[in-house]
Amino acid sequence: MTAPPPQAGRLASALRELRTRTGLSMAALAAKTTYSKSSWERYLNGKSLPPREAVQDLCRLAGEPEGHCLALWEIAESAWSGRAAGATAPTSAPEDPPDRRDRHPALVALLITVCAVTVAGVAAGLLLLPGHPAPHAAATPTGPRCQGTTCDGKDPITMLCAAAPLTLATHHTTSGAWLELRYSRPCGTAWARMWATRTGDRLEVTTTGHTETARVPNARATTSYIYTPMTTTGRGTPVRACFHPAGGGGEECFDGRVR
């Protein structure tokens, strides 16, 4: 059996810390969620990828903003599925289907905590794995929290626009960073993200004259997905991302178009 990718270990470590914070045994954790004790044992040991909802449930029980673990989950999910193989060359493994009990209707309706600016002592305002922009009122996991121009300048994770985005274009920079242009049909917005970066790297996304920018704030963020805020787009809209490396060198731009 192929070993889990290292990204799965980082996610599992974060989940174990949250479980310790809850003070719950495996059996108690299973009783408070829709996932069995054996499933939680696999998730917390990094042997299989937990469903996104399981990560949200554990964050809720620990009183932890979701931004940290959901970003870790996204990276681990890409590695498990093999989609990240071209970017970071992880060892990929098939996802182990979760062992789940029947969902209880009341649990399906649970409100999720929206991403916060900081978790675990990270400074406010950083867009990195340990946190996403400021908390908002709780929202149900059905549908985005903004649409069109009401999304301008807002975080795609916080606004639930990044649940199933389309990738418009991908670019590998000469400095080794990876970039993507992303688009959400339900929100009608585009944004860019970068990873495998260096401190001080900057990424801009532009549509029809409107530009949003993200910067890698510190060394810890270099292992994270860094997202630009969103900008409104529509069918056929050209989208451009430009990367400015902190270590010098020329600007690198690439284009996509909303389909």
Image: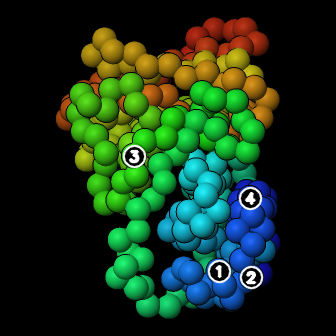
Which of the labelled discs sits on residue 25, or is there none? Answer: 2
Between 101 and 50, the one lying in front of the other is 101
Q: Is residue 121 visible?
A: yes
Secondary structure found at label 4: helix
Q: Amino acid at mark 1?
A: Leu
Residue corresponding to mark 1: 29
Mark with earlier residue (3, 4): 4
Label 1 crowding class (10 Å Cα cut-off): few <14, some 14-19, many 20+? many
Mark with earlier residue (1, 4): 4
Residue 234 at x, y percent in the picture = 21, 32
Q: CA distance from mark 3 to mark 2?
A: 30 Å
Quarter of the image where the N terminus is located: bottom right
Q: CA distance from mark 3 to mark 1?
A: 25 Å
Q: CA distance from mark 1 to mark 4?
A: 16 Å
Labels 4 & 2 near each other (Cβ < 8 A): no
Labels 1 & 2 near each other (Cβ < 8 A): yes
Residue 46 at x, y percent in the picture = 75, 71
Which of the labelled discs sits on residue 14, or is there none? Answer: 4
Mark with earlier residue (3, 2): 2
Secondary structure found at label 1: helix
> Could you tell me which residue is drawn at 63 percent across and 48 percent down?
68
Front of the two marks 1 and 4: 1
Q: 249 left or right of 108?
A: right
